[in-house]
Every structure is written in structure tokens, then in C-alpha cells.
Image (cartoon, rainbow, N blue to C red):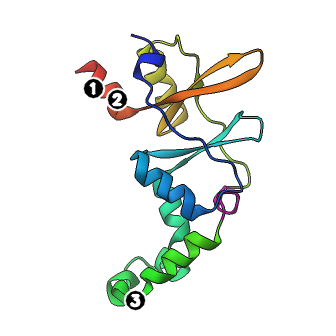
Amino acid sequence: MRARDLAWPCTPVHPDVRLEDATKLLVRERAPALVVVSEDGHPLTVVPAAQVLTAALPELVRRDPLSATVVGESLDEVVRSRAAALRIVDVLPRRPATPAVVSPDASPLYVASLMERTGSPVVLVVDYDDDHPHLLGIVDAATLLQYYL
């Protein structure tokens, strides 16, 4: 078994994509993270789904999570409008983490060790053909656990 066999397809996004569209993609693909790529398809970073959700939360709720119990559903529309107004580039840290990338022939043990070392929720499986990247998919911890059970 190799990384290519464990990878499940994912749709990469560009930094200028609206957060709302990226969120719909996460939900549709049930993905644990977004893969952000450059215009030429090179992986730039990985944005965990929880970070996407956090970016859409109102500042009040981010500062004081208990305030969510008081306001209830009254701020739900604020979350939706923030997701519509923000772009992926708006929620990235100044220095986004370099994504964990493996070749299609990487072993499951190497993928697991890279995930542990980088703390990334996913490892990208990328095939480079004449220096052009082809994102084959991502491997997450649940997939690796399933492999080892």
C-alpha cells in the first residue's frame, strides 16, 4: 500500500476564493481541511476546517465563547455574512505553514510520521510531472488509522 492508494480526492482552492465557497466545498467533500494552491497549482498551505469556521465567527464570540450562550441564534446571520465577505487569503496567517507533501509512492508509515512531525491534519499526495504539480489527494489520520486496524 502506498500514499496514492490511501489518498482521497480533494478540490484545491486559490487564495482569492470566498470563504463561503470554500465552506461549501468542505461540506460537500466532507473534508477535514482546505488545500490552498497557487495559480500554477503548487500547494501553498492547508487550512483546517475548524480554522475556516473560526474565521466566520463574530469577534465577540471568538473573544468570549460564553457569549454564544447568551446571543443564541441571533448572530447566525453574521456568521453567514462574514463567510460571504471574507476570502481565504483574509484568514491565512502572515506566514502560512508549508503543507506536508509526499510522493505517490510514500509508505503509510512515512505519511503518518510526517503528519505527526508537522502537526498537519492532512498530508498532500502530489505527483510532479515536469515540475508541474498534480494533487492526487489527501490522507488524513482517520484513513491511516483505518489502514492500520
Magenta segment boundaries in residue numbering: 87-93
Q: Is residue 6 magenta?
A: no
User: Label 2 to label 1, Cα distance in Å?
Assistant: 5 Å
- Local secondary structure at mark 3: helix
Q: Residues within 10 Å of mark 3 (few under 14, many from 20)?
A: few
**Residue 7 picture quarter:** top left
**Is there a contact, CB below 8 Å, between mark 2 and mark 1?**
yes
Q: What amino acid is at disc 2?
A: Thr
Question: In this figure, which residue is indicated by the disc labeled 2?
Answer: 143
Q: Is residue 91 magenta?
A: yes
| Tag of residue 74 | 3
Q: Nearer the viewer, residue 19 or 97?
A: 19
Residue 49's place in the image compared with 100, above or below, is below
Q: Quadrant of the C terminus?
A: top left
Q: Residues within 10 Å of mark 2 (few under 14, many from 20)?
A: some
- Residue 23 in the image: x percent, y percent? 50, 58
User: Label 1 to label 3, Cα distance in Å?
Assistant: 40 Å
**Residue 134 picture quarter:** top right
Query: Does residue 106 appear to the left or right of 38 in the view shown?
Result: left
Residue 39's place in the image compared with 62, above or below, is above
- Residue 107 in the image: x percent, y percent? 46, 12
Q: What amino acid is at disc 3?
A: Ser
Question: In this figure, which residue is indicated by the disc labeled 1?
Answer: 146
Task: First in sequence, mark 3 or 2: give its number.
Answer: 3
Q: Residues within 10 Å of mark 1 (few under 14, many from 20)?
A: few
- Residue 147 in the image: x percent, y percent? 30, 20
Q: Quadrant of the N terminus?
A: top left
- Local secondary structure at mark 2: helix
Query: Does residue 77 appear to the left or right of 118 in the view shown?
Result: left
Q: Residue at 72%, 33% (x, y): give it.
A: 42
User: Label 3 to label 2, Cα distance in Å?
Assistant: 37 Å
